[in-house]
Amino acid sequence: MSVFSSDSFDNHEQVMFCSDPASGLKAIIAIHSTALGPSVGGVRMWNYESEEEAIRDVLRLSRGMSYKNALANLNLGGGKAVIIGDSSKDKTPELMRAYGRFIDSLGGRYITAEDMGMTTADMAQVASQTKFVAGLEEGAAASGDPSPFTSHGVLIGIDAAVRHQMGRDNLNGIRVAIQGVGHVGYALAQELVHRGAEIIVADVVKDNVARAVAELGATAVSTAEILFQDVDVLAPCAMGAIVNDQTLPLLKCRIIAGSANNQLARTDHGQALRARGILYAPDYVINAGGMISVANEVHGVLVPHDEAMKMVEKIGHVLRRIFADADAQGLPTEAIADQTAEALIAAGKAEKSGRAQSAAA
Ligand code: NAD
């Protein structure tokens, strides 16, 4: 089992392995970068098949958070944590409190929040042991559920992509296929219908589909068909790696813009989408809305809901710049996003080491 020689290792600043036999906690915390501020990212509880898989996941996800937080201009670095176990069976208040003590021991270099397998109630247990936690329901700057902010950001991103790719200044009559109508996908569907778009949906949970059909007039298709609809926009809001060698030749959309993380199975799929004339809104840019809301809480600022929604709309500017730069340089959109994030992080690092040197002088 290796960390430094892992393919996913990207000069992470710190990786901490946490064990608490009394509660059964086995966790890994990865701080990718604090160049732009304290590292922030969610904790995921997952029944990993191996420790290698957990290490890979935490290394990859923490780097992703550095990039997301840099491009959203949040003055925050990137980190992530994984707890090894089945959240439906192994998660207890004691385990979450033990996790909270490890977070506290990092003294604020990593601030944790919800990810898969976690609830606001779990974060309350963490908060009983440390102040370095966000995504809470209660507290001076509590920001609550990030999903409505994420879905609003995706709507703004779809609008920017439609303007760029189709030269349209509204979403009236635009056809959008949404894969997954859960927290983000359903709220996105609501906003799209409100803006006059036509929606096609699929979900593995039948009740979620029935709700979208009954309440929003959505057209339902099977989960096997949703990615291949003849639509203007495909909005993946369920799982990652939906653009892969098998799906690519069958895609009929003009734009891919949704909330799911890690939508491209491999980086070169970005180039393949560009070659096919499909505009891709890089996932970690378009799905940053929830993080923008959480960042206010991290910075201790209570921002009214409507104002936080307005802050999320800056995602539209960031995407417009990425689309324009990608066209100008003939590069895939996510390559432009990565380059921009890397430049911001490198500048933050240089500034930090400059400050450290002048303090030592
Ligand atoms: P969720 O669990 O509430 O919703 C996901 C939905 O997708 C569920 O209804 C699920 O049944 C459905 N689904 C799963 N597999 C499917 C399949 N093969 N085909 C069709 N539907 C399927 O999760 P969410 O909070 O809405 O997040 C959706 C995606 O966005 C996830 O990838 C998540 O990591 C990402 N994301 C979410 C947020 C947020 O604020 N919630 C922020 C950033 C990224």
Image (cartoon, rainbow, N blue to C red):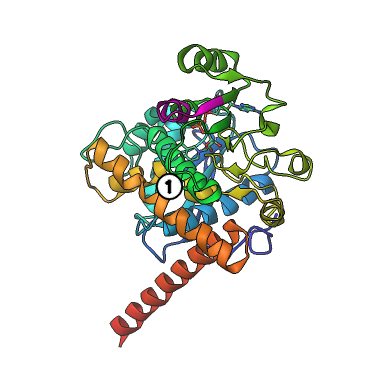
Ligand 1 quadrant?
A: top right
Q: Residue drawn 26% across and 32% down?
A: 138
- The amino acid type found where label 1 is placed reads Phe
Magenta-span inclusion, residue 192: yes
In the image, residue 359 above or below residue 191:
below
Do we see residue 296 in this rendering? yes
Residue nearest the observer in this picture, 43 or 186: 186
Q: Residue drawn 21% across and 42% down?
A: 302
Residue 336 placed where, x, y %?
55, 63
Does residue 39 appear to the left or right of 16 in the view shown? left
**Residue at image mark 1:** 102
Q: Which quadrant: the C terminus?
A: bottom left
Residue nearest the observer in this picture, 353 or 287: 287
Residue 162 placed where, x, y %?
51, 44
| Secondary structure state at the residue bearing disc 1 | helix
Do we see residue 18 in this rendering? no
Circle 1: is it few (<14), some (14-19), or many (20+) Cα within 10 Å? Answer: many
Q: Does the residue labelled 1 lie within 8 Å of ligand 1?
A: no
Span of residues in magenta: 188-199
Q: Residue drawn 63% across and 21% down?
A: 204
